[in-house]
Amino acid sequence: QVQLVESGGGLVQAGGSLRLSCAASEATFSRYAMGWFRQAPGKEREFVAAINWTGNTRYLADSVKGRFTISRGYAKNTMSLQMNNLTPEDTADYYCAAAPNVGSLYESTRGRGIDYWGKGTLVTVSS
């Protein structure tokens, strides 16, 4: 069974940085687009960032542009999200997702229609 495993969540003060990583358990995912969604307490899941398999097409939610950067690893079944200048509004569970094309991630409403998910990693930003 394919697994997506996130790492790197934690507690950070406002203005700080965290780096999230996601690794897919199968090399076949090296040809998949990968991305991040997040879900804050009491809120719906929302798109954060996505990147295609080559790494040359990237999408970021408006709320994180200029602060977050998404990248693929040298091993294309890995992905990272560098988060800078974090605010308490970024506090959420962050989920790694994978899909055959990057549009499926970017255009997904609340993550619907995406088949592959990690279990999530919690990011808490204190004020």
Image (cartoon, helix red, strand yellow):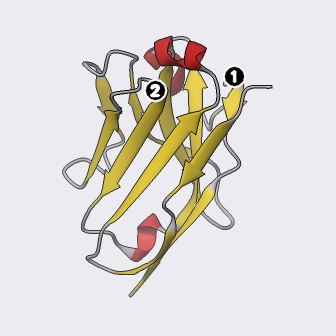
The residue closer to the viewer here, 22 or 48, is: 22
Left or right: residue 78 versus residue 24 is left
Crowdedness near tag 1: few (<14), some (14–19) or many (≥20) residues, C-alpha within 10 Å: few
Q: Amino acid at mark 2?
A: Tyr
Residue 52: x and y, percent? 39, 19
Quarter of the image for residue 117 reads top right
Crowdedness near tag 2: few (<14), some (14–19) or many (≥20) residues, C-alpha within 10 Å: many
Residue 43: x and y, percent? 64, 59
Does the image show residue 107? no
Taking 42 as reference, is 16 above or below it?
Answer: below
Task: Residue lying at the far right in this picture: please name it.
Answer: 1
Q: Residue at x 31, y 35 (%)?
A: 71
Quarter of the picture holding the C terminus: bottom left
Does the image show residue 20? yes
Q: Residue at x 48, y 60 (%)?
A: 8
Assign a secondary structure to mark 2. Answer: helix
Residue 97: x and y, percent? 58, 33
How far apart are labels 1 and 2 at the CA level?
11 Å
Taking 11 as reference, is 127 above or below it?
Answer: below
Q: Which residue is mark 1?
A: 113
Q: Residue at x 32, y 69 (%)?
A: 86
The residue closer to the viewer here, 9 or 90, is: 9
Q: Residue at x 42, y 76 (%)?
A: 88
Q: Disc 1, disc 2: CB below 8 Å?
A: no
Quarter of the picture holding the N terminus: top right
Q: Amino acid at mark 1?
A: Gly
Task: Residue lying at the far bottom in this picture: please name it.
Answer: 127
Q: Which residue is mark 2?
A: 106
Q: Earlier in the sequence, mark 1 or mark 2?
A: 2
Q: How many marks?
A: 2
Left or right: residue 4 versus residue 10 is right
Residue 121: x and y, percent? 60, 59
